[in-house]
């Protein structure tokens, strides 16, 4: 079994070279508003996001473009791995967002469009993240999401 620290290192390495998109590139073109993205506009690096930032912007990933999703996803995965049994909505929403099979065909297609820019190493880090989260109280959700990624 891979340790939490190894998964965190894998995520960090996989997303290390991803450049932060400009704020006007964060909003998904099919999303109706960007209110949930506002907390991210002032964050220069996903690595600077503390627990409060992640918790307060838990809904933001649902409205991110593919570039924004690829850039900010590591912060959400990091929070989940560091707080695997947290009752904060960010944990369940992060896992659920990686499982488009939960949604109608239209929403599933929207969600999958956010994965378009993820490369092989980034996808592998998501698999490792979901596998690690199977040991948490969100294990059933993580297992269900793995279907999308394996």
Image: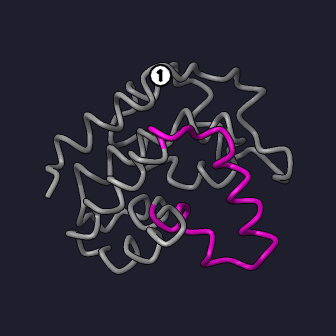
Report the residue marked by disc 1: 45
| Spot occupied by residue 112 in the image (x, y as percentages of width and height) | 69, 58
| Spot occupied by residue 111 in the image (x, y as percentages of width and height) | 69, 59
Q: Dividing the picture into quarters, in which one does residue 41 lie?
A: top right
| Spot occupied by residue 104 in the image (x, y as percentages of width and height) | 74, 79
Q: Dividing the picture into quarters, in which one does residue 51 lie?
A: top left
Rendered residue at 38%/45% (across/down): 125
Secondary structure, mark 1, is loop
Query: Magenta residues?
Result: 95-122
Q: Relative to 131, say whether 40 is above or below.
A: above
On screen, residue 42 versus residue 108, left or right, reads left
Q: Relative to 70, say whether 4 is above or below.
A: below
Is 97 one of the magenta-colored residues? yes
Label the magenta part by its dominant secondary structure: helix
Rendered residue at 51%/68% (across/down): 96
On screen, residue 72 versus residue 137, left or right, reads right
Q: Dividing the picture into quarters, in which one does residue 64 lie?
A: top right
Rendered residue at 20%/69% (across/down): 135
Q: Relative to 83, say whether 50 is above or below.
A: above
Q: Relative to 30, say whether 74 is above or below.
A: above
Rendered residue at 38%/61% (across/down): 91
Quadrant containing the N terminus is bottom left
Crowding at dot 1, Cα within 10 Å, few <14 / some 14-19 / many 20+, comes out as few
| Spot occupied by residue 79 in the image (x, y as percentages of width and height) | 32, 47
């Amino acid at each position: 079994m891979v340790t939490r620290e190894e998964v965190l290192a894998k995520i960090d390495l996989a997303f290390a070279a991803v450049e932060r998109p400009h704020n006007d590139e964060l909003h998904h073109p099919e999303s109706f508003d960007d209110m949930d993205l506002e907390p991210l506009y002032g964050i220069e690096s996903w690595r600077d996001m503390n627990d409060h930032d992640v918790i307060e912007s838990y809904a933001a990933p649902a409205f991110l473009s593919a570039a924004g999703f690829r850039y900010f996803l590591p912060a959400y995965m990091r929070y989940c791995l560091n707080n695997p049994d947290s009752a904060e909505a960010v944990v369940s929403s992060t896992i659920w967002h990686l499982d488009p099979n939960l949604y109608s065909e239209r929403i599933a297609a929207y969600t999958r469009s956010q994965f378009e820019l993820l490369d092989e190493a980034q996808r592998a880090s998501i698999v490792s993240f979901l596998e690690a989260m199977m040991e948490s109280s969100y294990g059933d959700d993580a297992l269900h999401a793995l279907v999308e990624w394996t």
